[in-house]
Amino acid sequence: MTTTRCNKLKVAYLGPPASYSHQAALACFSDDEYDFDPQSSIKVFTLDLLVDRESSFPDLLVCGELYMSVCHCLVGHPSQRQPQHSSSEDSQMPGMSQPERPSCRTTNFQNINAVYSHPQALGQCERYLGLHLPGVERHDASSTSKAAEKVANEGPNSQAVAISSSLAAKVNGLEVLAKGIQDRDDNSTRFFILKNKGSSQESHDRSPNRPSSADRLEWKTLVSFTLAQQPSGTLADVLQTFKDRELNLTGIHSRPSLEHAWHYVFLIEVQGRREVKGGGTMNEALEELGRKAKDWRWLGSWIDQAEQQRGAVQIEQ
């Protein structure tokens, strides 16, 4: 988030409009108070961004998160429909989603020669693509809405389809050929809300569905650190720092530091919050982390939406 000339904060998201990132931004920010800035390219996997090996983003913080259920659709031009009845039914495994289609129309799959989408969306629809579009070339796009835009720009005679949201289909004048084609019904994506330290107070949380009582809030804290080459057990010693204070770790990730072979940057998510004014159990743990780690960085504290929501926010289907 950055500030515009008219003192409105600008929210950047992976565009073009109608992307899942755009819908996530709209779920968190009012367009009366914020300007929205679509980006053609962005490091979507923000853990890699937060590793920040070159110290390019020293002021970047996580200030919120959003879990959103995702309903993938196969979208294309109306010409890819043909009036026929289909008697075949998909086999369905427990936990798998069952695609929805209009009862009297099916897609002319034989005419389709390409599928465009974001790599993550393609992977989440592997079963459907294998059943209905085997052998059809898959092409990566920077976002699902960009994939829909590309198919739209190819014109009504295009033999390509895209995996995107129904909103992206509507915005680009395409038709939903099949809905709910993701492999699992519980498919959801977590979005991080990022900001610069100077944009507002450090502990400010921008997550939706915030409880009214601050005393009941459950928080998460994200920390990155590296270790010096020491005897085995060094990582365990660092993690013990949090266990000794009954601070629960909800996630741990690692990325190569690129300093030398087999050296890593660790990122951990911990239940609890860093107090800006000092004091508190989390602050004590972070102080001890500073003594044990080669270097470390606090990357933000925010309200734990997994605890507060216990169910993904439903976006435009």
Image (cartoon, grey):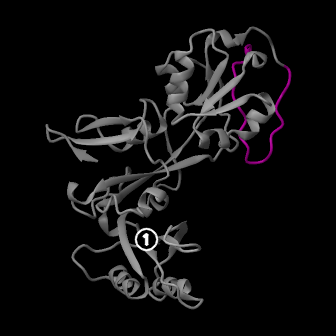
Secondary structure that dominates the magenta span: loop
Is residue 21 depicted above or below 201 in this figure?
above
Residue 287: % across, % down: 34, 85
Would residue 246 be counted in the magenta stretch? no
**For the C terminus, which image quadrant?**
top right
Rendered image quadrant of residue 26? top left
* Stretch of the chain drawn in magenta: 87-106
Which residue is located at x 48 percent, y 38 percent? 20
Which residue is drawn at the image coordinates 43% and 87% (left, top)?
292
Near-viewer residue (4 or 258): 258
Q: In this rendering, would 83 be left or right of 53?
A: right
Q: Position of residue 113 (x, y in %)?
A: 72, 21
Quarter holding residue 128: top right
Q: Position of residue 230 (x, y in %)?
A: 53, 89
Q: Is the residue marked by circle 1 packed among few (<14), some (14-19), or many (20+) residues within 10 Å?
A: many
Q: Position of residue 111 (x, y in %)?
A: 75, 15
- x 50%, y 26%: residue: 168
Is residue 97 in the magenta section?
Answer: yes
Along the line of sight, which residue is nearer the eye, 172 or 229? Answer: 229
Helix or strand or loop: what does disc 1 sit on?
A: strand
- Amino acid carrying label 1: it is Ser
**On screen, 83 above or below 161?**
above
Residue 107 visible, this angle: no
Residue 102 position by quadrant: top right
State the residue position of label 1. Answer: 224
Would you say 127 lies left or right of 153 here?
right
Q: In the rendered view, would you say 272 is above or below 63? A: below
User: Which residue in the rendered view is the most extreme toward the bottom?
Assistant: 231
Q: How many marks?
A: 1
